[in-house]
């Protein structure tokens, strides 16, 4: 089985590193982007198997990135998991409407991230 590639779209370097600490030892290949525009450039170089996406990002927020991603690839081709500090019902509704497969709020636990990633990569 080939290693699964995960794109982490997160502007806080500490959180990027924390997610890498959780996921890399489990055999995932990771690429990171600090905002939506950078994430689109990463995707042009190769489609990931899953995206962990923050909403509040500089330059291009997570919602706008998600809208543009859906133009590039078939919806549901890439599972997108929102990982954000936004806990509002409106943000969760918008994420579902765009096609997010899951919504994790910060602060999160390592096992929560890992279980959610594994669940959506096996579907």
Image: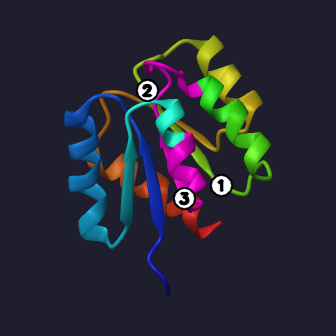
Q: Tag 2's secondary structure?
A: strand
Of the numbered discs in the image, which one, if any, rests on residue 47?
Answer: none
From the viewer's side, name the closer residue of 40 and 55.
40
Q: Earlier in the sequence, mark 3 or mark 1?
A: 3
The stretch in magenta equals 40-62
Q: Residue at x 78, y 41 (%)?
A: 71
State the CA–CA distance, disc 3 to disc 2.
25 Å
Query: Compared with residue 83, is residue 78 higher up or lower down, i.e. above or below?
Result: below
Q: What residue lies at 64% left-to-right and 24% top-to-bottom?
A: 64
The residue carrying mark 3 is 45
SS state under label 1 = loop
State the image coordinates of residue 106 (x, y, percent, origin top left).
35, 27
Instruction: State the SS at label 3.
Output: loop
Residue, disc 2:
84
Neighbours of disc 1 within 10 Å: few (<14), some (14-19), many (20+): many
Q: Earlier in the sequence, mark 3 or mark 2?
A: 3
Residue 78 numbered tag: 1
Residue 43 lies within the magenta run:
yes
Q: Nearer the viewer, mark 3 or mark 2?
A: 3
Question: Mark 1 vs mark 2: which is more N-terminal?
Answer: 1
Q: Is residue 123 above or below residue 77?
A: below
Q: 95 above or below 21? A: above
- The picture quadrant where one finds residue 25 is bottom left
Q: Is residue 18 magenta?
A: no
């Amino acid at each position: 089985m080939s290693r699964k590639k995960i794109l982490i779209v997160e502007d806080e370097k500490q959180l990027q590193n924390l997610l890498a600490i959780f996921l890399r030892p489990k055999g995932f290949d990771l690429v990171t982007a600090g905002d939506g525009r950078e994430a689109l450039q990463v995707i042009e170089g190769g489609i990931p198997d899953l995206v962990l996406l923050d909403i509040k990002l500089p330059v291009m927020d997570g919602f706008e990135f998600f809208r543009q991603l859906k133009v590039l690839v078939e919806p549901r081709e890439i599972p997108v998991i929102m990982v954000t500090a936004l806990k509002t019902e409106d943000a969760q509704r918008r994420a579902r409407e765009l096609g997010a497969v899951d919504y994790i709020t910060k602060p999160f636990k390592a096992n929560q991230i890992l279980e959610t990633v594994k669940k959506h990569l096996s579907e």
